[in-house]
Image (spheres, rainbow, N blue to C red):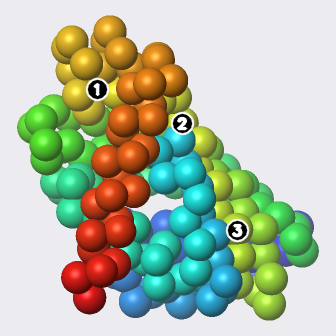
Amino acid sequence: MNDRHVALISAFYDALGRADFAAMERCYHPEVSFSDPIFQEVEGRDRVMRMWRLQLGVRDGLKSEYRDVTADDFTGTAHWTARYTFSSTGRQVVNEIDALFRFEDDLIVRHRDDFDFKRWSKMALGRPHGLVFGWTPMWRKTIRDRATQQLNELMSSS
């Protein structure tokens, strides 16, 4: 067990819960990469932080809780729950997420969130999209492409 890395993961989720982007950024290595079922590979601290700003912008009233934080000298894990209103649809979402971390220089250099995309799409998008299409590769690609486009637009506007 590496207490510094457990504290780092906890500091990240505490900052996420406050939408404190500066504190979140301090937890990340400059060469961090992030991925989840929607954002496949986001590389570099600036781009990853813009992705978080984008995600928190489409999540109204995010409340997050985390638990089961473990870490050694190289890797860590946590489980977190995100509760929010998906702004595009006004639907309530409770997303259960398993996170994996890798550390370098006592910072997070790799962050991977994993959740049930079909379950998320049913909650966030509702019928018919989430229920009918939530499991199809084509629908996942559509959601991923839309998220990547929004992130690229955010990056180019700065």
Question: Where residue 141 appears, x then y in whole percent?
Answer: 45, 35
Describe the element under mark 1 as helix, strand or loop: helix
Describe the element under mark 2 as helix, strand or loop: loop
Q: Identify residue for label 2.
A: 115
Q: Is 65 left or right of 126, judged from the image as shown? A: right
Q: Identify residue for label 3.
A: 110
Q: Which residue is drawn at 88% across and 71% down?
A: 74
User: Any mark on residue 60, and which?
Assistant: none
**Total number of numbered discs in the rendering:** 3
Amino acid type, callout 2 = Phe
Picture quadrant of residue 125? top left
The reply to whether residue 104 is in sight is yes
In the image shown, does 125 or 97 lie closer to the viewer? Answer: 125
Q: Which circle's residue, 3 or 1, is located before the other in the chain?
A: 3
Determine the CA span between mark 2 and mark 1: 13 Å
* Residue extending farthest left: 90
Where 127 falls versus 16 (above or below)?
above
Q: Which residue is drawn at 77% across and 86% down?
A: 106
| Residue contact between numbered discs 3 and 1, judged by CB atoms under 8 Å | no
Amino acid type, callout 1 = Met
The reply to whether residue 11 is in sight is no
Q: Which circle's residue, 2 or 3, is located before the other in the chain?
A: 3
